[in-house]
Amino acid sequence: MSTEDEAVELEPYEADEDSVDEAKPIHRWIRAALIALTIPWIIVFVIATQLYPYEDGEPLRMGTHQQLGLPECTFKAKAGIPCPSCGMTTSFSLLIHADVWNSLKANFAGTGLATFGLLFIPWALASAFFGRFVFVRSLEMLVFRLAIVFLVILFGRWAVVVLVELLSS
């Protein structure tokens, strides 16, 4: 046991100004870029509301993009199996029509991406308004991690779809 003679006196720690964890202000061009990046997301969601991801009352799994005058997926037509993004438009549209379960069934990577977009819009607008990244310390690390997670989900899902397609043939 220690005695009073052995007590060590501690001095308060003063952090350097550089080490203080404060949100740094962002430049005006970044604020403008954040606002500009919300515009494509808004357009995508407006288009998704205009699409009808059902046929005879049953939810589609893919092909909703053809309502926009686009052709069938070239990859699927040539290879005979869906591409990694097959079902994304259908998934977005189903999610916007509040059919979450069928959105997940169409392409759960698309549901995740659409959810990201729905969260990105208010985050980007709030960050632009306040002049700092809201709830984010390192934007670079966040973007990197989100990209890796999305790619793993997208291609992991695709691997399962291809395996199921090949086994059922």
Image: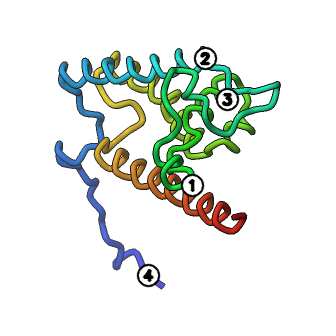
User: Which is more foreground, mark 3 or mark 4?
Assistant: 3
Question: Along the polypeptide, which appears first: circle 3 or circle 2?
Answer: 2
- Classify residue 121 as left or right of residue 56: left
Q: CA distance from mark 1 to mark 2?
A: 28 Å
Q: Position of residue 120 (x, y in %)?
A: 45, 29
Pointer 1 local density, CA inside 10 Å: few below 14, some 14–19, many at least 20: some
What residue would you read off at disc 4?
A: 2
Q: Amino acid at mark 3?
A: Leu
| CB atoms of marks 4 and 1 within 8 Å | no
Residue positioned 56% across, 32% down in the render: 89
Residue identifier under label 2: 49
Circle 4 SS class? loop
Q: What amino acid does circle 1 point to?
A: Ile
> Residue 8 in the image: x percent, y percent?
31, 71
| Residue 11, disc | none
Kindly state the secondary structure of the residue where label 2 is placed: helix
**Closer to the eye: label 4 or 1:** 1
Q: Secondary structure at mark 1?
A: loop
Return the residue at label 1: 81
- The residues tagged by marks 4 and 2 sit, at their Cα atoms, a distance apart of 72 Å
Residue 3 left/right relative to 84: left
